[in-house]
């Protein structure tokens, strides 16, 4: 799988985890994590790579290990 496909896979994984945690919107995840909503959107669409600090904040809200959200 190409690098872009790999990034998109992690974006889909993030979106699925957000919805499973009953966080219906990217804006709500943004408020809970302190990560700007446009970055959450880019991450879910595979337009941006996950940083370790973002992954840690997301894992605190959605559960799991921070490495679950990185590639």
Image: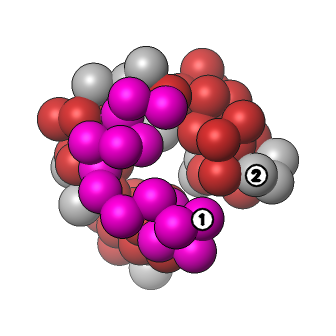
Q: Which residue is mark 1?
A: 21
Q: Is residue 55 visible?
A: no
- Which-is-in-front pick, marks 1 and 2? 1
Q: Which type of secondary structure does the marked residue at label 1 adopt?
A: loop
Q: Which mark is residue 63?
A: 2
From the image, which quarter does the N terminus lie in?
bottom left
Left or right of 35? Residue 42 is: left
Magenta: predominant secondary structure element? helix
> Marks 2 and 1: in contact by CB < 8 Å?
yes
- The residue depicted at 29 percent of the width and 57 percent of the height is 25
Does the magenta portion include 25? yes
- The residue depicted at 72 percent of the width and 36 percent of the height is 60
Q: Nearer the viewer, residue 70 or 3?
A: 70
Q: Residue 49: where, in percent of width, then height? A: 39, 40
Q: Residue 50: where, in percent of width, then height? A: 47, 38
Above or below, comparing residue 43 to residue 46 in the picture: above
Q: Is residue 5 visible?
A: yes
Q: Residue 6: where, in percent of width, then height? A: 45, 67
Using the numbered discs, state the Cα–Cα distance from disc 1 to disc 2 in whole angstroms.
8 Å
- The residue depicted at 27 percent of the width and 25 percent of the height is 36
Q: Which type of secondary structure does the marked residue at label 2 adopt?
A: loop
Does the magenta portion include 48? no
Above or below, comparing residue 51 to residue 24 in the picture: above
Please provide the residue range marked out in magenta.
17-32
- The residue depicted at 36 percent of the width and 64 percent of the height is 24
- Based on the displayed image, in which of its 4 quarters is residue 52 positioned? top right
């Amino acid at each position: 799988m190409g690098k872009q496909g790999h990034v998109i896979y992690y974006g889909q994984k993030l979106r699925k985890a957000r919805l499973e945690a009953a966080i219906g919107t990217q804006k709500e995840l943004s408020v809970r994590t302190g990560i700007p909503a446009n970055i959450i959107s880019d991450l879910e669409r595979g337009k941006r790579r996950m940083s370790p600090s973002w992954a840690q904040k997301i894992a605190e809200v959605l559960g799991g290990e921070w490495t679950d959200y990185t590639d």
